[in-house]
Amino acid sequence: MGEENKVALVVGGSRGIGRAIVRRLAASGFDIWLTYQSNHAAAAEAQAEVEALGRACRLLAFDLADRAASRAALEPPVQECCPDALVYNAGIARDNLLAFMKDEEWDAVLRTNLDGFFNVTKPVIFEMIRRKRGRVVVISSVSGQIGHAGQVNYSASKAGLIGAARALAREVGRKNIFVNVVSPGVIETEMTAGLPKEQILPLIPLNRFGTSEEVAAVVGFLCAEPHMYVHGQVIGVNGGMAV
């Protein structure tokens, strides 16, 4: 991890928490591969921020729920230059009570949040194993730890990411590949803009929502810290919402 021109692949890096992670890693000396689905303007803005920090930024646009599209986009560059760090930050929410949840609301969330992890991680982890080094950070959610009404699909997908990351940590630890989970609570982003603060704040001991930069700081440590013995862990960034 001390080499020059380190590369971090940030999945879902054009907005919100992902964009803060991109800035943090670029400031730490990583060149960035940034994946996104369709918001070209936001991706271009994130790219400009990285380049302003003196680092290179490669944009990769594809639907990570599409296995063939994911591998077609990732396998060629990964085989050419395997990233030093992979941050899986993608996620969508389609909230509804389970009794009224539509099939497509369940399927869309699981395909993006959980299947997407498999689709993008498999080609990267294979090359990391060959090189015998790497960092993988999976962004889950407090919803995957304690569950929230109206989020059975989202909670299932985020809990699934925790289980997948812990199992992967056992598989690849001996190859000098560190795998950890960062589990944010309620963070000020577009996704949480419509939430009723007056109902949620009493549940948070710090009595405020978190910021994307606070999540990015933990991710930056896990990706860049040279003295590392943190492996297979779930690190909450939730203001005490889950203790």
Image: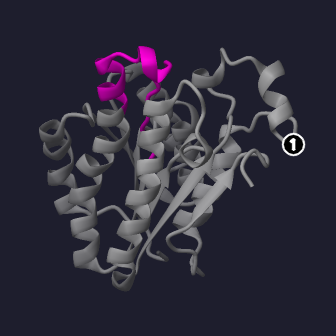
Residue at horizontal 52%, vertical 64%?
A: 223
Instruction: For residue 40, say whether it is visible.
Output: yes
Q: Nearer the viewer, residue 232 or 210?
A: 232
Colouring method of the image: one colour
Vertical side of 125 occupied by 212: above or below:
above
Q: Quadrant of the C terminus?
A: bottom right
Residue at horizontal 38%, vertical 58%?
A: 164
Q: Which residue is mark 1?
A: 206
x and y, in percent, of residue 154 in the image: 47, 33
Vertical side of 117 occupied by 186: above or below:
above
Q: Is residue 132 left or right of residue 66?
A: right
Crowd band around label 1 with a 10 angstrom C-alpha radius: few (<14), some (14–19), many (20+): few
Residue 229: quadrant of the picture: bottom right
Residue at horizontal 26%, vertical 31%?
A: 63
Residue 141: quadrant of the picture: top right
Which segment did they paint magenta? 88-109
x and y, in percent, of residue 13 in the image: 45, 38
Q: Is residue 231 left or right of residue 124?
A: right
Instruction: For residue 32, say whether it is visible.
Output: no
Q: Nearer the viewer, residue 222 or 159?
A: 159
Q: How many marks?
A: 1
Residue 149: quadrant of the picture: top right
Q: Is residue 5 left or right of residue 216?
A: left
What kind of residue is marked 1?
Leu
x and y, in percent, of residue 207 in the image: 87, 36
